Amino acid sequence: MPRIARIKKAHPARILVASIMAGSGSDEELRNWQTLAKACQDEGADALELNLSCPHMDRKDMGSNIGKDQGLISIVTQAVADIARVPVWAKLTPSTTDIVLEAGGAFLGGAAAVSSSNTFPSLPLIDPATLEFEMNVDGLVSSGGLGGPAILPLSMAKMAQLTQAFPDKAFSGIGGVAEFAHALNYFLLGCGTVQVCTAAMLDHAIGPNVITQLTEGMRNTMDRHGWSSLDDFRGIRRDRVVTHSKIRRPDAKAYHGGYESEGYATSDR
Ligand SMILES: Cc1cc2nc3c(=O)[nH]c(=O)nc-3n(C[C@H](O)[C@H](O)[C@H](O)COP(=O)(O)O)c2cc1C
């Protein structure tokens, strides 16, 4: 907690978002969210991000287990929003069938923004020679969150669903961002901010080189396209994501429009 105050004091003009996490199985657990939220905002955090999405929790009332339950998402978000003086962001898990439902729960609870994605559940590969998992402890592994380049297109698909369903809401894009070309994908889909984790951890300087690359890349890209602010390019490719039947086929004559246009959707056969 003291770090938040120190960072804010050193960089008062910068925005500092504090990430918090607690359980949700009882009123006491909900009060823990509020305690954390109050402490962070009292130390100077400009916004709070609720971690409703960590995939490493055995507890059923924590992390991505909250993020898989739109009712719990609403309850936790509202508990924090009730006492927050700063905007509350809800960070969702990609491990659900339709992330639009969970985002709806977050907005209903008072979230000012939704962040996506947290990591995707994954296992390390098995070495074909030793038949051991490439990473293990005493031969055992547990499903762990995957971030980095592999998840950029996966997370984009989630973000496109979100920004199309809620075009007037605020979103923070996360997953696979190491340079501005990656971040640009999220902005073009409608995000106002992006976040970086894996690339910063891989940077031996723990982040500054990534930030330098991102800001330089942003300046160059904005110059190239003649953009003067984020508003010039935020969301300008959001509506290019369509259903399969709207994609033109090479031989249009042989294609009759797919499920909806051919009447299967209304057929009772
Ligand atoms: C080692 C590690 C630790 C993480 N810890 C947290 C955490 O404490 N809270 C959280 O909300 N997300 C956490 N994440 C998720 C990241 O913030 C981010 O959502 C995810 O890694 C995807 O972004 P990336 O591709 O830039 O890594 C963690 C990810 C990694 C790889």
Image (tube, grey):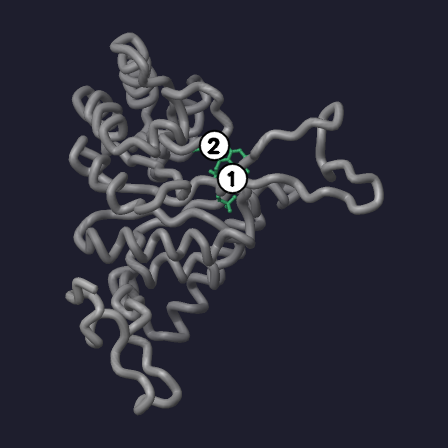
Whole-percent x and y of residue 146?
55, 42
Crowding near the residue tagged with mark 1, few <14, some 14–19, many ≥20 C-alpha atoms within 10 Å = some
Left or right of 71, for residue 64 = right
Q: Is mark 2 within 8 Å of ligand 1?
A: no
148 in relation to 44, above or below = below
Residue at the spot 29% in from the left edge and 55% down from the top edge? 161
Residue 157 visible in the picture: yes
Whole-percent x and y of residue 156?
40, 56
Looking at the image, the residue that sits furthest to the right is: 129
Counting labels gives 2
Q: Residue 55: which disc? A: 2
Q: Quadrant of residue 143?
A: top right
> Toward the viewer: 43 or 251?
251
Residue at the spot 18% in from the left edge and 31% down from the top edge? 109
Crowding near the residue tagged with mark 2, few <14, some 14–19, many ≥20 C-alpha atoms within 10 Å = many
Q: Residue 121: which disc? A: 1
Would you say the residues marked 1 and 2 are in contact, meaning their CB atoms lie under 8 Å apart? yes
**In the structure shown, which secondary structural element does the residue marked by tag 1 occupy?**
strand
Left or right of 139, for residue 109 = left
Q: Quadrant of residue 106?
A: top left
Q: Residue 13: which disc? A: none
**In the structure shown, which secondary structural element does the residue marked by tag 2 occupy?**
loop
Label 1 to label 2: alpha-carbon separation: 7 Å
User: Three-letter amino acid code at disc 1?
Assistant: Pro
User: Three-letter amino acid code at disc 2?
Assistant: Pro
Q: Quadrant of the N terminus?
A: top left
Whole-percent x and y of residue 103?
25, 41
